[in-house]
């Protein structure tokens, strides 16, 4: 059924495209490390990463991996997606592999002293944070400093570069005059939003993919890393207050953002068994998506909700004679949102990894925030069983599904439907769903795209109370071709919140050769305009009424940076941009799925 395995395998590592580094920081690799790395690679890695085409092997080839940074490979082997496969290797062996593949020395680029500034904070600062900017996840800021009449005058104010980075996907939180965001290698930076200088820095144990949350009295910084560790930091110093692992399955992970209400932190849990399934000898699969609540004061776990209530057991035989396990999967890739009126937590789930399929995959669930008790489930796509072994490898389920996750968080729109609250959410199927918050009952549904594993609605939407703004990826590398009569239609769409009617649509403009013309990143809605990034690296501003493009900036270029680190822009994917006090902040760089790597946060300001 699927023809896109070669593209999805990029989930294993960040992009194959070459990423320029500061040559002064790259030292020659020793002959000893080259020999060790070659030996370990041959014995451990080559079976999946030989130089055959991706369609004939289990992972990106040696030639493709050579374009990555050594730190990215070492990170993948140590705290990332290849941790399980590299578990028997010593630290020196992992370093040697990274250096052998890239022919570059593994070392950390020092942050210049001039990159830092003194941290100071007003007594009662304003703040907004989380993946959608608020508990409802609306992605809307009633900002008028940047508007339809002056957006065309936006110019680069400053650029901050993340050392050795190839992917920038943690959305900045804003508190007072500061931005706080995580990074690919676990660095959490507090940046002055006017100058881009570092006020403080914290090192987490693993990469931070989601947004941080600001909450509490006094205010604290909360976030989770990829290894499911949850952190509480002192806002003024970045000092660690507590740390608690939230996952229990050995392959559990966090790719979304935490949500915080008063004394409760809600954490979404996925698993990278979807990748481990590539090994035909792996006992696939036993994990379940989860949502876990922690006490914000001490990090104590309050409750744990499993998306699949029963534990996995032997469920069949694979083509190689080994056992299948299930049910499994129904993971929580995205972020939860909190309904303060009803005391509910809403979140989306992904596909089942193996048979039997459950009624909780590709679904929206609501749980009680106090107890974690399931209140309702709305399943949008049934019998979706899929993992990266598909198609044809032993761990691929017999009935391979379409892989139509809910990757984004449901958005709570207060009074959005004839004065009543409504829950809206987009799916990778290309369908926008409007649901009753109390029951999960469908109010209306509207299809805006062809959908597919890399199509449809990935990262989110934005809602201003009247219109829903949805980015449709319909990436030609991963669309659903089960209906040949429906055409792919990547772009930005505006829907009427009352009826789901499409008010306007603006196709993603054609891209330069080698770039992907698709809108996958979540948009940001302001009072008059909508910002949306594209996989070709362009950030664009759209008129909210007509959908006309008012401003277009190509971020794929090299930059002089405020912290003295070599910077380059790339694809815009993941969370939405951020606007605060007339400054637009844009993450640039997304080295996965064949997209363009990059390592910068760009600040734009209207030219006076």
Image: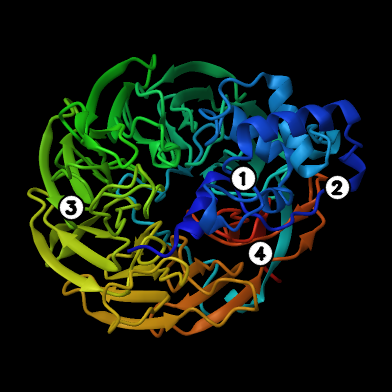
Left or right of residue 164, residue 75 in this image? left
Say what secondary structure mark 1 lies in.
loop
Say what secondary structure mark 2 lies in.
loop
Q: Is residue 318 above or below residue 248?
A: below
Residue at position x 90%, y 30% from top? Answer: 30
Say what secondary structure mark 3 lies in.
loop
Residue on which disc 2 sits? 22
Which sits in the foreground, 135 or 424? 424
In three-dimensional space, the C-alpha distance between marks 1 and 4, rounded to whole angstroms, equals 44 Å
Q: Of marks 2 and 3, which one's residue comes earlier in the chain?
A: 2
In three-dimensional space, the C-alpha distance between marks 1 and 3, rounded to whole angstroms, equals 32 Å
Position of the N terminus by quadrant: bottom left
Residue on which disc 4 sits? 605
Please tell me in which quadrant of the rendered image residue 330 appears.
top left
Where does residue 354 sit, x and y in percent of width and height? 26, 42
Where does residue 195 sit, x and y in percent of width and height? 73, 48
Residue on which disc 1 sits? 49
Residue at position x 47%, y 68% from top? Answer: 477
Query: In the image, which is nearer the foreground, mark 1 or mark 3?
Result: 1
- Crowdedness near tag 4: few (<14), some (14–19) or many (≥20) residues, C-alpha within 10 Å: many
In three-dimensional space, the C-alpha distance between marks 1 and 2, rounded to whole angstroms, equals 27 Å
- Crowdedness near tag 2: few (<14), some (14–19) or many (≥20) residues, C-alpha within 10 Å: few
Which sits in the foreground, 514 or 301? 514
- Crowdedness near tag 1: few (<14), some (14–19) or many (≥20) residues, C-alpha within 10 Å: many
Q: Of marks 1 and 2, which one's residue comes earlier in the chain?
A: 2
Residue at position x 83%, y 40% from top? Answer: 104
Residue on which disc 3 sits? 383
Where does residue 242 sit, x and y in percent of width and height? 48, 15
């Amino acid at each position: 059924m699927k023809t896109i395995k070669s593209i999805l395998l990029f989930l294993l590592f960040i992009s194959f495209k070459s990423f320029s580094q500061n040559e002064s920081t790259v030292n020659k690799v020793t002959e000893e490390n080259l020999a060790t790395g070659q030996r370990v690679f041959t014995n451990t890695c080559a079976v999946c990463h030989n130089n055959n085409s991706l369609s004939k092997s289990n992972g990106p080839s040696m030639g493709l991996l050579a374009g990555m940074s050594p730190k990215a490979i070492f990170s993948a082997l140590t705290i990332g997606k290849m941790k399980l496969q590299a578990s028997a290797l010593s630290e020196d062996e992992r370093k040697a592999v990274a250096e052998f593949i890239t022919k570059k020395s593994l070392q950390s680029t020092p942050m210049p002293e001039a990159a830092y500034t003194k941290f100071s904070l007003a007594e009662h600062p304003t703040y907004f944070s989380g993946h959608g900017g608020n508990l409802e996840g609306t992605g809307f800021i009633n900002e008028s400093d940047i508007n339809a009449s002056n957006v065309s005058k936006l110019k680069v104010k400053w650029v901050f570069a993340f050392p050795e980075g190839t992917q920038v996907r943690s959305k900045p939180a804003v508190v007072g005059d500061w931005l706080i965001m995580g990074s690919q290698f676990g660095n959490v930076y507090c940046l002055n939003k006017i100058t881009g200088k570092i006020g403080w820095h914290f090192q987490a144990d693993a990469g931070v993919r989601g947004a941080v949350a600001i909450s509490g009295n006094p205010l604290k910084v909360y976030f989770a890393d990829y290894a499911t560790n949850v952190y509480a930091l002192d806002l003024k110093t970045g000092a660690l207050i507590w740390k608690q692992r939230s996952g229990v399955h050995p392959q559990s992970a966090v790719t979304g953002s935490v949500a915080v209400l008063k004394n409760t932190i809600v954490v979404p849990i996925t698993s990278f068994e979807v990748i481990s399934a590539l090994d035909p000898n792996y006992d696939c699969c036993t994990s379940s998506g989860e949502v876990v609540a922690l006490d914000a004061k001490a990090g104590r776990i309050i409750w744990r909700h499993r998306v699949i209530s029963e534990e996995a057991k032997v469920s069949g035989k694979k083509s190689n004679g080994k056992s299948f396990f299930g049910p499994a999967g129904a993971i929580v890739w995205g972020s939860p949102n909190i309904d303060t009126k009803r005391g509910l937590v809403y979140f989306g789930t992904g596909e089942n990894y193996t048979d039997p399929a459950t009624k909780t995959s590709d679904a929206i669930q609501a749980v009680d925030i106090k107890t974690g008790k399931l209140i309702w489930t709305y399943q949008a796509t049934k019998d979706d069983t899929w993992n990266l072994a598909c198609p044809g490898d032993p761990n691929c389920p017999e009935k391979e599904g379409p892989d139509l996750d809910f990757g984004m968080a449901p958005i709570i729109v207060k009074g959005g439907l004839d004065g009543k609250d409504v829950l809206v959410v987009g799916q990778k199927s290309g369908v926008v769903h409007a649901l009753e918050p109390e029951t999960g009952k469908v109010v209306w549904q509207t299809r805006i795209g062809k959908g597919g594993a890399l199509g449809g609605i990935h990262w989110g939407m934005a809602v201003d109370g009247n219109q829903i703004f949805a980015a449709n990826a319909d990436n030609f590398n991963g669309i659903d071709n089960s209906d040949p009569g429906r055409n792919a239609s990547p772009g930005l769409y505006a829907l009427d919140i009352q009826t789901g009617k499409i008010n306007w649509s603006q196709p993603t403009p054609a891209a330069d050769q080698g770039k992907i013309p698709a809108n996958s990143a979540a948009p940001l809605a302001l009072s008059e305009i909508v910002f949306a990034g594209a996989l070709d690296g362009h950030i664009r501003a759209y008129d909210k009424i007509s959908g006309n493009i008012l401003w277009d900036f190509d971020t794929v270029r090299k930059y002089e940076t405020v912290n003295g680190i070599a910077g380059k822009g790339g694809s815009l994917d993941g969370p939405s941009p951020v606007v605060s006090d007339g400054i637009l902040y844009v993450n640039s760089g997304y080295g996965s799925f064949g997209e363009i790597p990059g390592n910068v946060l760009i600040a734009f300001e209207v030219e006076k």
